Image (cartoon, helix red, strand yellow):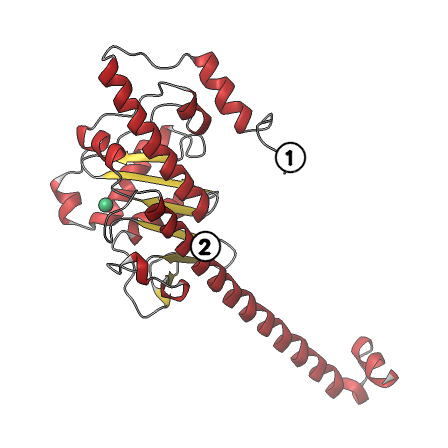
Amino acid sequence: MSVGIRSFHGNTVRNQGVERNFTLYRGGAALVFRRSAREAAKVNLGKDVLEANLELVRRGLVLYTFGNASGISRDEGLVAIKPSGVPYEKLRPEDMVVTDLDGNVVEGSLRPSSDLATHLELYKAFPRIGGVVHTHSEFATAWAQARKPVPCFGTTHADYFRGAIPVTKPMGPEDIAGDYEKNTGAAILTLFRKIDYERIPAVLVANHGPFAWGADAAAAAHNAVILEQVARVAYRTVAINSGATEIGPELHDKHFLRKHGAKAYYGQEK
Ligand SMILES: [Zn+2]
């Protein structure tokens, strides 16, 4: 045994074979470790993404097979997304389709959601997000169809979004005829050139509906639910008073900054 250990450090002719075996063993162990980390990432993503999709159903954000949630493992470069057109009640974690950042399916026999390319554009451009959600939830979609940003009328909105929820420009005929889902992502990114995606983690795609994102799939679903709520209440606010004005900057900042950023103090210590 002492010969083996010495050979690992020393490099005598007599012990070269032992050393090579050690190197092969270490290489093999590293490969096994890499493979198991990748498998674990796929399993965890599948569970998280299914749960985020089911949350959209529980909160009444989706009808039939509308909507989709995805999540990303940045370490592994893997994205998991709901399969296209499968009823939610039949979904299992292993049904989530796993792709790389170019949209190549690496696991799963089902086709990914048709909106995958939009999700991928957001993951590539927004490096700190871990989940994306798209729905046609009623009130957020109404604002998207009206092509009006959701104004920040109150503190519920200010707790989550630092400003109005913006609307993309309508897409042109070439963008629609071309790579439509990817171009939808591009329209969002054009809008967010001047907006901090962590300050406003949601958008309305003109004449279509909302996308929301967050630190992981669950956070993205949570933001989509809150977006629908603030869109609903903003609609009611305007119905009661068409001249209602947005929340003032002091109250807006107070609410946003007590939950987000370096000086946040809302909730419990993490
Ligand atoms: Zn859609």
Q: Which quadrant does the C terminus fall into?
A: top right
Residue for point 40% across, 56% down: 50
Dot placed on the residue nearer the N-terminal end, 1 or 2: 2
Whole-percent x and y of residue 118? 30, 48
Q: Which mark is residue 48?
A: 2
**Ligand 1 found in image quarter:** top left
- Disc 1 vs disc 2: Cβ atoms closer than 8 Å? no
- Residue at the image point whose x is 53% and y is 28% from the top: 259
Q: Residue at x 50, y 61 (%)?
A: 41
Query: Circle 1 — which element?
Result: loop
Instruction: Spot the residue most to the right.
Output: 2
Label 2 sits on a secondary structure element that is helix
Judge the density around disc 2: few (<14), some (14-19), many (≥20) Cα neighbours within 10 Å: many
Query: For residue 243, which numbered disc appears in the image?
Result: none
At label 1, the amino acid type is Glu
Q: CA distance from mark 1 to mark 2?
A: 24 Å
Q: Is residue 95 visible?
A: yes
- Determine if residue 77 is in view: no
- Residue occupying image coordinates x 35% and y 18%: 153
Q: In the image, 114: left or right of 199?
A: left
Q: Position of residue 90 (x, y in %)?
A: 31, 63
Mark 1 highlights which residue? Answer: 269
Q: Looking at the image, is 192 positioned above or below residue 241?
A: below
Q: Position of residue 215 (x, y in %)?
A: 48, 43
Say which quarter of the image contains residue 184: top left
Assign the N terminus to one quadrant of the image: bottom right
Q: Give the crowd class for mark 1: few <14, some 14-19, many >=20 residues within 10 Å.
A: few
Query: Which residue type carries mark 2?
Result: Asp
Where in the figure is residue 66, as x and y percent of width and height?
A: 24, 50
